[in-house]
Image: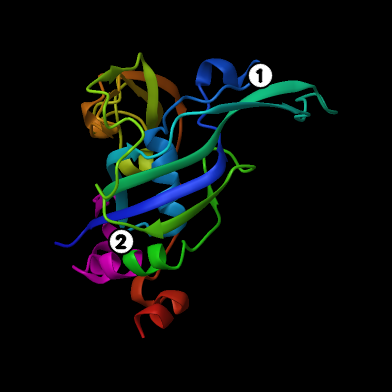
Amino acid sequence: MKNSVEFKVSGRHALFTDPVTRMGGEKCSYHIPTYEALKGILKSVYWKPTLIWLIDEVRIMKPIKTEAKSVKPLKYGGGNDLSVYTYLADVEYQVKAHFEWNLFRPDMAEDRIDGKHFQIAKRMIDKGGRQDIFLGARECQGYVEPCGFGEGIGAYYDIERLDYGIMFHGFDYPDETGKTDEDGKPDENGEYRLHSRFWKPVMQKGGIKFIRPEECTMRKFVREMTPNPPQSNGLNEEALQNELD
C-alpha cells in the first residue's frame, strides 16, 4: 500500500510549547518540533476519519534560534495579561510520515481504498495544504511544499548525537485508541480516556526518529473523553469527488 509522504515545512516563527510553561502565562518553545505538532500539520494538509497519520522522522534544516516577544494574552477571568513568549525563529524542517487505517472507524471501511488517499495527500502537499498551516501556535504561520527527505545538508549534520530530556510526544485520543485502562493500554472493559504521552528524543546528525505512540512508556491520564468523531459519507463527499474527477 502506498502510504508514505515527504514534505518540507518552514516559517518565520514556531512555538512548540513545553507543557511546564503553558499554564504560567510565560510560554517557552521546545527546540525541536513535537510529534503532535507535526501530526497536526499533516492533518491540515489532508485528513479523513478513515486514516491516522504517523510521523516517522524529522530533519532540522536550519540552526535553532530563539526570539522573545512581549504579548498580551487573554486572562481566564477576563481582560489581558502581560507575558513574554519565547519562539523559535526562522525554522525549516523535512518530515517523513505515513498513514494507517483507523480500525476504530468500521463505518469508513469502504473508504479504505489503496492508492486513493496517497494520491490526494501528495496533491495537497503540492498545493500547500487544504487548511492554514500553523507551527505549534496560531500566530506562527507555516508553509508546506514537497521535497525529497534527506536532500540537502541540515544545520546539525556534523553533530553525532544530541540527547534531550523528557519531552511531550502527543495525545492518545479515544477515537484512535478505543477503550483503554488507566495506563493507556487497550482494554475492551476499560473507559474512553484521553492520555498524554512523553518520551526522550535523540537527535543524530540533525535528524530525529520518532517512536510509535504505543511504544511510549510514559503516559499521564488527562480525563475521560467520549469519542465524537466527524461523520463522513466517504466517496459521496462532494469535495472529495471533485478532487478524484
In the picture, measured across the screen, residue 199 lies left or right of residue 171, that is left
Q: Tell me which segment is drawn in magenta.
A: 98-121
The tag on residue 107 is 2
Query: For mark 2, does the 10 Å Cα neighbourhood hold few (<14), some (14 to 19), or many (20 or more) residues?
Result: some
Give the residue at x 38% y 51%.
8
| Residue 172 is at least partly visible in this image | no
Q: Distance between the residues labelled 1 and 2?
A: 43 Å
Please, what secondary structure does the residue beneath circle 1 have? loop
Give the amino acid type for the residue marked by disc 2 in the picture.
Asp
Give the residue at x 41% y 59%.
145
Q: Position of residue 229 (x, y in %)?
A: 43, 51
Query: Are the residues flagged by discs 1 and 2 in contact, CB closer than 8 Å?
Result: no
Q: Position of residue 151 (x, y in %)?
A: 27, 50
Give the amino acid type for the residue marked by disc 1 in the picture.
Glu
Which residue occupies the extreme right position in the image? Answer: 79
**Residue 101 within the segment the image draws in magenta:** yes
What residue is disc 1 on?
26
Q: Position of residue 55 (x, y in %)?
A: 29, 42
Please, what secondary structure does the residue beneath circle 2 have? helix
Q: In which quarter of the image is residue 224?
A: top left
Quarter the N terminus occupies: bottom left
**Residue 194 within the segment the image draws in magenta:** no
